[in-house]
Amino acid sequence: MQQTKAVITGVGSFLPEYRLTNDELSRLVETSDEWIMTRIGIKERRIMKDKDKASAYMGAKAIEELLIKTDTHPGDVDLLICATVTPDMVFPATANVISDMLGIKHAFSFDINAGCSGFLFALTTAAKYIETGSVKKAIVVGAEKMSTIVDYTDRTVCPIFGDGAATVMLEPTTEEGIGIIDSKLQVDGIGRKWLHQKAGGSLNPPTHDTIDARWHYIYQEGQPVFKYAVSNMADVSAEMMKKHNIYPEELAWLVPHQANLRIIDATARRIGIGMDKVMVNIHKYGNTTAATIPLLLSEWEPKLKKGDKLIFVAFGAGFTWGAMYVVWGYDSK
Ligand code: UT7
């Protein structure tokens, strides 16, 4: 019997229009375009300025594009998973809100919080549902309004993050050699002390004191996060390439989470590929957490060809990290 695998059959994205430039940031905190470009590699990031539009809105806009491009009726979707660290509300799940916004009536939907690795965790989960045959059309979306948890008085964090959403459709295939071939996901809770948001959950529910202490913003100690990100992203990518005997020249693209150009560069060097084979858009959008990888796929879709070998890799809060080996399933129209 032929094995059923999940294959990506479409992509969609949404980016808010407002561009927060390094020059504007350097009027908010003591920083410079030169520092941000040298240490992180970001020129500008998009910000959702509308107060009444958050992650669900952006996720829904991205999925709207996906439904049109794949000619899919909302009623035909079976599963919707939203990866986010900036849900619209603590509950219900942002995925439930998106389903309602789009008239996705026959799907079950839920959120996954795995920091910047959220998209890989969600994509792996959706692929398993497809592989078992219980789901025929699954949508995975990464949607983040990071600007709501960024402290724009903290120069060590505010240059990094941006807002946006992007999505993929997953469907079954029995065609040999294409689709989601393999996935390795890992966590190590040691990392939570260096990257977290202290308040807003059940441990520190919102009070005047938590607000005064700025506990509703991202807390990050950059150096340990950087160190773990570099070694884990490089190791897990190299492991995935070795396991599947992928030589550097055979890899079409590395699709890395966009947190810092130096981390991306180190990962590429470790697996022996040049930057010409690495998808990079961090300079335009910054770190959109769970949305970075599908945003890359959306931008590169016109260049992707059926059979292209891709490695997706991410690292984020938790710590969480992982890599996926994906063979692209279609030529762009
Ligand atoms: O997606 C997963 C989550 N996050 C990450 O992957 C982030 C990982 N970490 C990083 O990308 C880097 O650690 C940062 C970009 C956050 C920081 O870069 P760094 O090279 O590790 O800088 P640093 O923290 O060692 O700071 C170096 C200096 C410090 O000054 P002193 O103490 O040497 O005088 C900082 O105060 O740079 C200073 N600094 C800045 N200067 C200008 C920190 N932020 C800024 C800034 N502008 N925005």
Image (tube, rainbow, N blue to C red):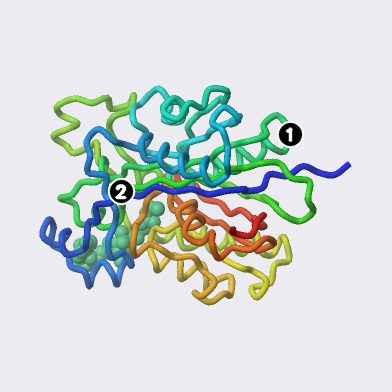
**Residue 65, label in figure:** none
Picture quadrant of ligand 1: bottom left
**Residue 132, label in figure:** 1
Name the quadrant of the C terminus. bottom right
Q: Quadrant of residue 313?
A: bottom right
Image vertical order of residue 272 relative to residue 299, above or below:
below
Q: Is residue 161 left or right of residue 214?
A: right
Tell me the element at label 2. loop
Name the quadrant of the N terminus. top right
- Say what amino acid the circle numbered 2 marks: Pro
Q: Residue at x 26, y 66 (%)?
A: 36
Confirm whether residue 223 shows in the render: no
Q: Is residue 204 left or right of residue 71?
A: left
Q: Residue at x 47, y 40 (%)?
A: 63
Q: Can you give x and y, in whole percent of width and height, for residue 30 in the image?
A: 13, 62
User: How far apart in space, not on screen, are marks 1 and 2 (Cα)?
Assistant: 37 Å
Confirm whether residue 11 shows in the render: yes
| Residues at discs 1 and 2 in contact (Cβ within 8 Å) | no
Q: Is residue 81 left or right of residue 98?
A: right
Q: Nearer the viewer, mark 1 or mark 2?
A: 2
Q: Residue at x 40, y 68 (%)?
A: 262
Q: Can you give x and y, in whole percent of width and height, for residue 10 in the image?
A: 57, 48
The answer to whether mark 1 is within 8 Å of ligand 1 is: no
Label 1 vs 2, first from the N-terminus: 2
- Say what amino acid the circle numbered 1 marks: Thr
Is disc 1 surrounded by few (<14), some (14 to 19) or many (20+) residues within 10 Å? some
Q: Residue at x 41, y 30 (%)?
A: 94
Q: Quadrant of residue 228?
A: bottom left
Tell how many labels. Answer: 2
Q: Can you give x and y, in whole percent of width and height, for residue 309 in the image?
A: 65, 63
Residue 44 or 39: which is nearer the viewer? 44
Mark 2, residue position: 16
